[in-house]
Amino acid sequence: MILKLADLPQKSFCPQRVCPLGAHVDHQHGLVTGFALDKGITFHYRPSEKFFLESLAFPGSARFSISHVPPRQGNWGDYLRGAVRSLAARYELTCGVTGIFEGSLPVGGLSSSAALIISFLTALCRANGIQISPQELIAVALEAERDYVGVHVGILDQSCEVYSKKDHLLYLDTRDQACELLPRPGNMPPFEIAVFFSGIERSLAGSAFNTRVDELKAAAYALKAWSGMEYGSFAQTRLRDVPVEVYEKYRDRLPKNWRKRADHFYSECERVRKGTEAWRAGDLEEFGSLIFASGASSIHQYETGSAELKRIFELMKRTPGVYGGRFSGAGFKGCCMALVDPARKEEIAERITAGYVKAFPHLQSKFAVYFCRTDNGASQPG
C-alpha cells in the first residue's frame, strides 16, 4: 500500500445489495427484487492527472493514463479500466483520479464488483464535471462488467445499488427496466438482513456463471425454433421472449440441463410475482418461504452452490428466527443472505456459526456473520 487515506479528502460510496427473489433471471430479462444495504464500498480519492488506484481488499494497484486504457489484465483493476473505457466513449475525460477502495462487507455474492464500479464512476464524473443520469450510470457500469471484463451479467446489481430506497423493496422488470419501490407495510414484523460469508471468495468470470447463461439462451433459441417464433440472433435471444405456454408445450424436447435451467427461470419469475404480493400484504412469513423455495431451486434446477453454501442454506432452514434465505449472488461460493428476526439475531449467528464450523473447521477464522439494514441507493454524481 503506497497511498494513505489521510491524503485522499473526497469520498464516494455505493451500497452493496441482496436479491431476495429473482435469482439468475435478470440476464434473461426476468423479474427481480432487491435491497440496497447500509454497508458497501467507499472510494477515498482526489483528482489527478492519471489513474492510480489501490484496494484494501486486494493486492496490487491499477495504474494507467486517460489516453490509454490497457487491455484486460485479469485482476480487480479490470473493472475500473472497463469503467473508464465505457465512460470515455460517451464523455470527454480531462481528469483522472487517485484513490483507495475500502469495503465493509466481504467479496462474493453481494455485488461488490458493481459497487466498486459505481463508486468509482461517481467520483470520476464529479472530478470531470459530468452530469450523468441514473439510467446512464447503470448502463456504463453494466457495459464495463459485461463487455470489458467479460461476465454476462444482467442489470439487477447496478439497478439495486442505484435505485433502491430505505425500507422499500425494489421490484424490477429487467426487460423494459420498469421499476417500482414498494414501501414496507406497517403491519410487517421487523426484520434485518443477515449475511453469512462462507470464507471462500469467487470470481464470476472464472466460474460456471457464463455457462448457465448460455444454457438458458440455448433453451430459448430452441423453443423459438420449434414453435415457429422469430428467433433472430443468438446473442439477442432471451428466455423471457418465450411465453410460458410455449415452454410447457415443448419443454420435454430440451436436453435435461437446459430444461432444468428453464424450469428455474419460469418458476423464479412466478415466485417474484407471489413475493411482491406477500410483501404488499405485510406477510413476511410467506415472503420468507418463497426465498427458501428460490434457494432450493437454485440448488436443484439451476445447479449452483458449493458444499459450503449448501451447508449454510440447510442451517438457515433449521434455525428459528430465519424467515427465509438463499445464496446471495450467483451461488458459486461467496455468501448466503437471510431475512431474520432482529430479536433473535445473536442466537441465529451463534447457531449457524457453530454448525458451519463443525462442518468446515479449517474455515473458522474466515467465516463471518454480518447484520445489515436496507438503505438508499448510491448518490448520483453531480
Image: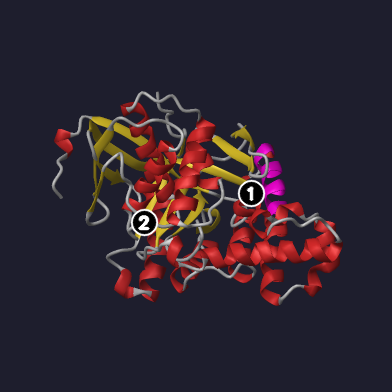
Relative horizontal placement of residue 19, taking residue 110 as reference (left or right): right
Residue 72: numbered disc: 2
Is residue 270 magenta-colored?
yes
Q: Tell me if residue 79 comes above or below residue 168 in the rendering.
A: below
Q: Going 35% across and 46% down the picture, which residue do you hit? A: 80
Q: Going 72% across and 61% down the picture, which residue do you hit? A: 220
Q: Tell me if residue 303 comes above or below residue 179 in the rendering.
A: below
Determine the main secondary structure of the stretch shown in magenta.
helix
Q: Tell me if residue 348 comes above or below residue 50 in the rendering.
A: below
Q: In this orientation, which residue lies closer to the viewer: 76 or 33?
A: 76
Pointer 1 or 2: first along the chain: 2
Q: Going 71% across and 66% down the picture, which residue do you hit? A: 219
Report whether residue 22 is seen.
Answer: no
Q: At which x and y percent is residue 362?
A: 30, 74
Q: Tell me if residue 336 comes above or below residue 83 in the rendering.
A: below
Q: Which corner quadrant of the image does residue 84 belong to?
A: top left
Foreground tag (1 vs 2) = 2
Residue occupying the far front of the picture: 67
Relative horizontal placement of residue 87, taking residue 29 as reference (left or right): left
The residue type indicated by label 1 comes to: Phe
3D distance between C-alphas at marks 1 and 2: 41 Å
Q: Which residues are magenta?
A: 269-280
Relative horizontal placement of residue 243, taking residue 57 as reference (left or right): right
What element does badge 2 sit on?
A: loop
Asked if the residue under mark 2 is in contact with the one under mark 1, i.e. CB atoms within 8 Å, the reply is no
Q: At which x and y percent is residue 171?
A: 63, 40
Q: Which residue is mark 1?
A: 287
